[in-house]
Image (cartoon, rainbow, N blue to C red):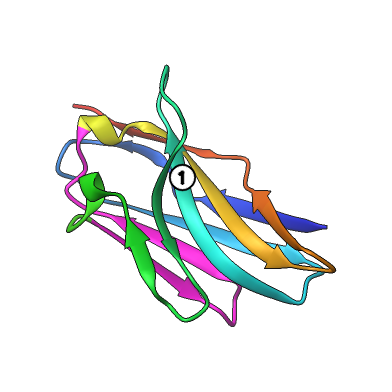
Amino acid sequence: QVQLVESGGGLVQPGGSLRLSCAASGSFLSIKTMGWYRQAPGKERELVADIDSGSSTNYVDSVKGRFTISRDNAKNTVYLQMNSLKPEDTAVYYCNARVLTSLLRRFWGQGTQVTVSS
């Protein structure tokens, strides 16, 4: 089994910054893509950003230029640096990883709350 443990959420004022971290642990052969999704109240879960094993990245348009995703393959950890935060960024942020065990499987973290408010 694979566990994803997130940290770094919290309350921040508009214009502020937060850094989310997600560490993968357990038994697996390799991690392909790691990413962050978010879900605001009453809305569907959406992809925020992801990064593959070659460090190619993908962002939703609403966060381009403000958020940066990165990963440390030695630590099996993905980060999301969030700058210039807006109230509309308020959501539960979920870490996601596509992991090769005996099969290629998708795993989710438990979620971390990000609230942007004055």
Residue at 49% x, 71% y: name it: 52
The quadrant of the picture occupied by the C terminus is: top left
Boundaries of the magenta span? 67-86
Residue under numbered circle 1 = 37
Residue at 16% x, 48% y: name it: 84
Q: From this view, report whether residue 61 is shown above or below residue 28.
A: above
Question: Is residue 40 inside the magenta stretch?
Answer: no
Tag 1's secondary structure?
Answer: strand
Pinpoint residue 71: horizontal percent, then vertical percent: 47, 72
Residue at 83% x, 57% y: name it: 1
Pinpoint residue 18: horizontal percent, then vertical percent: 32, 50
Q: Which is nearer the eye, 15 or 24?
A: 24
- Which amino acid lies under the numbered mark 1 shown in the image of this protein? Tyr
Q: From this view, report whether residue 62 is shown above or below residue 35.
A: above
**Label 1: few (<14), some or many (≥20) within 10 Å?**
some
For residue 89, what is the image quadrant?
A: top left
Residue at 41% x, 23% y: name it: 43
What main secondary structure does the magenta stretch of the protein show? strand
